Each structure stands twice: as C-alpha cells, then as structure tokens.
Image (tube, rainbow, N blue to C red):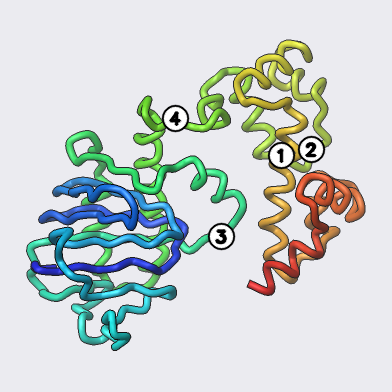
Amino acid sequence: MDPPWSIRIQDEAPLTLVTMMSGEAWHVPDAGDPRRLRPGDIAIMRGPDPYTFAADPATPIQVIIHPGQRCATPAGADLGQEMSLGVRTWGNSPHGATTMLIGTYQMRGEIGQRLIAALPPLVVLAGGSFDSPLVALLGEEIGKDEPGQEVVLDRLLDLLLVAALRAWFARPEADAPAWYRARTDPVTGRALRLLHHHPDHPWTVATLAAATGVSRAALARRFADQVGEPPMTYLTGWRLTLAADLLRDPDTTIATVARQVGYGSPFALSTAFKRVRGSSPQQQRRGLTAR
C-alpha cells in the first residue's frame, strides 16, 4: 500500500496474524489507543471485533474487508478485482511503501478457543525481539503459484503463529493461562501431555500418577496447584472440548465421538455433556448446523 490508505477489518475472523515486511502502519481499535507497527513487527489480532489498519489513524476508511474476505468500498462497491496485484497480492500500488503479510484463521473450534481466550485483543512482538527465518520464508513463498502451494503456506503460517505465541507467552506481561505454564513442570507437564494425547484411555488419578512416577496424593496436589483444578476435572473438560469439535463433522456418529474421547457409550457422553455444558451432544450438533 501507498499512503494515504485505511482499511476497515470486519471479517469476524477469530485470529489474524500480520507481519510488517516494510513501511509502517497503525492498528486502530474501535475502543482504545492506536498502535504503530514498524518493519519487522508481528501483530496478532483476536476477533471477532472489528478494527482498522491505516497509514495514519486520521485517514478516512477507504476499504472494508467483510466476512469471506470480500473487499468493498464503504459504499459497498466490490474492490476484489480492482485492487488485485497478482498471486495472493492485493493493494493500491504494486510497489507500495508498506508491505504486510496477512494470515487469517477462520477456525471456530473449541480447542482453538481455549488458546484464543488467553490472548488480549492485540499482541505485538517488536521486530527486534522476535527473530525467525519463517518470516522471510513465508514472504518468499506467498507469491508462488505452484502445485500444493496452499498447503505449504498453511504450514508455514501455523509454524510462525506457534513461534510468535511461544515468544508472547514467555513474557511476564502475557499472563499465560495456568495450563500453559504447567506444561514445563516435569510431573504436571507429563500428566497434561498424557491426557491430551490419550483422552480415550481409562484414566484414574492412580494410573496417571503411576505414569508420571509419583504418588496419587503428590500428583493430585501438584496438578491442582499448578493447573487450578483436579486432574479428573481437567480431563472431563478436555474430553468434552474434543467431543464438541468432533461433533462438527455430521458424518461422525455420537457413538464414535464417545469412543474417541474416552466414554464407553453415547449415553455416558451425553450425561457428561449435559452436566458440564447444559446441553446434549445432539443439541450441540444442531446448534452448529444452524450457524
């Protein structure tokens, strides 16, 4: 983009990652102070609330990004073709002073929401504090039009997002959630990995303690202190979170979902779902279909 420019983002995406390759831009929220982004900065925006990117906060909005990444003027005229500059490239000038790499996540899953909920509306990693070869690699690959390129870009974006989130949560001001901090503990961290990777296993506090090499009492105390809830309570929440995402596939039966998350029958899953979430798996699935 070349100034003056101002783009209103109201695509309702749960998560967006922006890397400043050259030039500067302002992130302007509807509430709160604008934030200047400089070359090398990485910004992560948590949706679905709208915000604006602009060369200057005072610049009137020229473009609105709607759901589905539809680009239009404030009056509603389509800009998709007019501002297209080639493969995955869009803007008002092919040699614009400001270049941003933008990756937008549309996932609505329960697992992703656990992480998104731990983020502030805007995370900024200054270019000098975050050095990763992934940025240059993504910049090199994004303009290519080759077989399988979408898969390559998706994986590179995922890696960059993970690296950026790790760097953010390592900071004291990030106030990382308890389950994230506990992952580095030799006992609680191992217990969390076992529960995450094998939710279908018939875990008890005793079997989990044996797998982590400590007593039942030691595991129960340490897990609750670090995660904020007992191991089996955490496991129930994790299983139901997985189940809620699996229910998004209309071809997966509730019996199959129950087996995959550690419940012996659809009735057992339904009972747990109603107790914790206040609705049955069938109601959860109907709600997803109606959206």
* Real-space Cα separation, disc 4 to disc 3, in angstroms: 23 Å
Q: Which residue is mark 2?
A: 201
Compared to residue 9, the image places residue 267 above or below, namely above
Residue 175: numbered disc: 4
Q: Which residue is mark 3?
A: 108
Q: Secondary structure at mark 2?
A: loop
Under mark 4, the amino acid is: Asp
Q: Residue furthest front?
A: 31
Tell me where residue 214 appears, x and y as whole percent: 72, 12
Under mark 2, the amino acid is: His
Q: Quadrant of the N terminus?
A: bottom left
Tell me where residue 119 appears, x and y as whole percent: 44, 42
- Mark 4 or mark 2: name the one nearer the start of the chain: 4
Tell me where residue 88 appears, x and y as whole percent: 28, 72
Under mark 3, the amino acid is: Arg
Q: In the image, what residue occupies the spot 33% across and 66% down? A: 9
Q: Which residue is mark 1?
A: 198
Q: In the image, what residue occupies the spot 24% across and 61% down? A: 53
